[in-house]
Image (tube, rainbow, N blue to C red):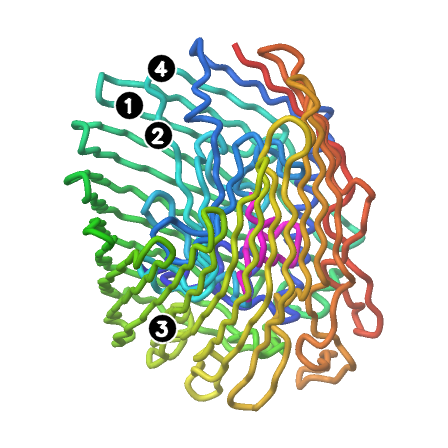
Amino acid sequence: MKNLSNLSSQHPLVSFLAPVVQTSRHSFRQRSFVRCFNRAMLAFIASGMAVSAQAQQQVDTSKKENTEQEQKVEVHGAKPMQSGTQKMSLSGEELFKMPGSGGDPLKALQTLPGIAANNDGDGGAAVRGARPSDNAYYVDFLPVGYLFHMGGFVSVFNPDLVRRFDVYSAAWSPQYGNVVGGVFDASLRNPRTDRIGGKIRTGALAANVLVEGPLSENTSFFLSARRSVIDLFVKEIKDEKAGTSFTFPSYSDVQGRFLWNIDNKNRLRFDLTTAQDSAKFTLKKDSIDVQHDPVLLGESALASSFNNMALVWESDLSSTTSSQLAVGRMVAHQKTRIGSAGAYATTSTLTYLRDQMTKNIGDHQLTVGADISSNVLDVDVNIKNPRCTEFDPNCDSTAANFSKTVSSQRDNFGAVYLNDRWRLGSQWTLTGGLRSARDDYLKETVIDPRLGLEYRYSPHTVFSLTAGRHHQEPSREQSLAEIGNPNLKSIRSNQIAFGLAQNLDQGWSWRAEIYKKEFDHFVVNDPLVNYVNGASGSAHGLEVLVKKDMGYGLSGFVSLSVSKSKRHNDITGENFTFGFDQPVIANAVLQYKQSDKIQYGARWSYHTGHPDTPIVGIRTGTDGRLLPVYGVLNSERMPAYHRLDLRVDFQKTERLSYYVELINAYARKNVGAYEYSADYKTRKPQAQMPFFPSAGLEYKF
C-alpha cells in the first residue's frame, strides 16, 4: 500500500502541519509560518488549561465495565511475524495515566526510543534519521491519512478504542512498503458485546461521545465522535503589538465499526474513520514576518480532512491458515490560502485492495500478500512556489514565481510480497522476505529484499539481526509534470539493526539495539527541471530501554537513544547535519501505585537541541528589501530541551476519580525557534510549552 502522504500535493509554505503537509520544514520562511502557528496552538492549549478543571464526565449505561476490551493497551516495537522483534508493552492504565499525555495513548509514542520531534506541538515523528513525511500510518490493516490533529496536540482516535500500538523503525516486514522512515500500526479494540452502552466526555478542549454494544447475537458496533469546543466560545485573539490575530483551530473526528461474527472462523467488519482540521490567522503590515516576507500579508488559512471506509474479511481457513482481505476507499482534501501568495487545493481519492494470508507449514510461517491501489489526484494550484527542500535554507517566497495548474491525474500501483519465518531449531530462527512493487506514474519497478536472524540464547534472552532495502516515492508536489519533475526516481534506503532483548524477574525487562541506515535519491531543487534526485544521507545509533511492568509499587520505563544523522548534497558536495538530528534523547516515565486509591506519576524528557541554520549577515535584494545571508546549513543548535510533568490520580469512590497534573513543572523555557528583528541584526528566542496546571474529573454511573 502506498503511503498517503506521498499521494497528495503539498506546498512548502504550509509545512507547519506535519501530519498533512509532507515537504521540508527547514527554510526560514517556513519557520516564520511555524512560529505563527505555534503561537496559536500554545494559546489554544493555555486557554484550555486556564479553565478551572478539565471536567471529564463519563456516562456508562452498562452495569459492568468491560476492562478487557476498554483498558488494555500495548505498545510494541514489532509484530510477531517480524524477525528480530523488540517488544515494549504498556497497559492502558499506564498510558491513560502517563503524566503530560492528557490521557491520550498515542502521545506515548514520543517517549519511545529513536523518535525525535523538534517542537512540543509537533506530532510528526522523525524515526532514526528519516523525516516525518517518510512514515506510513495504518490502523487495523488499513491506511490512514494522519494520526494527530493540528500538528500533534490531540490524536485522531478516541483513547477508549486504542488497544495496541506497533512501531517499526528499521528493516520491517515486506508487508509494509513505499516508506523509508518508520511504520506506525495501531490496533483498535472490538465493540463490547454484553449490552448497549456509552460514554460522554466533556472537557475544556473537546467533547466526545462513544456508543457501542451488540445488535444481535453475532453482530456489534461502536461509534465515536469528537469535536473541539474552545473555538465555539472564543472566536479570535489579537496581538496588536506583534501585528497578528488568529482564530482558535478547530478539529473533529469520527470512528465507527460494525462487526459481524459470521461463525467461529469468519468475521466481517466495516470500518469508518474521518478527521477534519482547520486553522486561520492574519498577519498585518507591522508584523515581523511580513516585514521579512511581504507576501505573507493578509489572511492565511488551512483546512484538511480525510475519510476512510473499508470492508475487511478475516478468516481462519484452518488451524494453520488465516487470511485478511480489505477493500476500501480513502478521500483526502486540503485547501490552503497564504496571504497574498495565492491558494492551493488538492483532492486525493484512493481506492485500494489489500490481501494477506499466513500459513504454518512445519517449521515455516509463510506470509503472502498483495496491495493494489488506484489514486486520482485533483490539483488546483495558483500560488508562489519557492520550491524549498531541506537542502536549501534560502527560500524567499516573495520573490518566487507563481506555479499554476489545474489537473487530474491517476496513478495505479501494485505490489506483491512474501515472507518466510523459518524455525531452524530450538534456538535459531531465519526470516527471509521479498517485496516487488510497480508504480505506473513514475514508471518504476522496485524489488526490496528483507532478511532476519534470531538466536534464543535462553528462554528469556534473544539476539536478533535484521537487514532490508526500502523504497519510497517522492512527494507528488515534486513529481507532478506541471510544477515538478515526473522523471524523478524513488528514494532508497538500506537498513540494518542488531538487537538484544531480555526478560528478568518481577516484571523487569530490557532491550538494546544498534542500527545503521543509508539513504539515497533524496530530492533537491533544480533551476531547469524544478527538482532532481541529487542527495543522500545516513543515520546510525544505539537505543536502550529498561522497563518495569505496572503493579503495586514502582513501575515505568527509561529509554535512551544515542545517534547521529547526516545529509549530503551530491550535486554541490555539501555535508550537513540532518534537521531532526538529536544526538541524545532520554525519557523516564515512572509511576508509583501506593494503593487502589492513589497513584503518583512523573515523566522527564530530555534531548539535545535540534539543529538550526543561523543568519550571519544581510544583503539587499533586487526589489530593495533586506534579505538574510545564511550560515552553514544546520550548523547551530537550539539549547538542550528538558521538561518534567507530574501527576497524581485519586480514586475517590468506585464511580468517582480525579487527577491533578503539572505540565512543565519547573517552568523550563525550551527554545523552539528564534525570531529575528526586521533588519536581521538581533534575535530573540521563542519558547515552547509553558508551565500550566491541569485537573480532570471522571464520574461513572
Which quarter of the picture shows residue 651?
top right
Does 169 lie within the magenta span? no
- How much space separates mark 1 and mark 3, taking CA atoms? 44 Å
Residue at x 74% of width, y 35% of height? 646
Q: How far, Cα to Cα, is label 3 from label 2?
A: 41 Å
Dot 4 alpha-carbon crowd within 10 angstroms: few under 14, some 14 to 19, many 20 or more: some
Task: Work out whether mark 1 precedes mark 3 in sequence or the reverse, and give the earlier one.
Answer: 1
Task: Tell me which segment is drawn in magenta.
Answer: 107-128
Report the mark closest to the observer, 4 or 3.
4
Q: Which residue is mark 4?
A: 196
Q: Image height check: is 196 above or below 41?
A: above
- Residue highlighted by disc 2: 190
Q: Amino acid at mark 4?
A: Ile
Direction bottom: furthest residue? 572
Q: Are marks 4 and 3 in contact (CB under 8 Å)?
A: no
**Tags 1 and 3 in contact by the CB under 8 Å rule?**
no
Q: Position of residue 390 (x, y in %)?
A: 56, 74
> What is the secondary structure assignment of the residue under circle 4?
loop
Give the Cα distance between marks 2 and 4: 14 Å
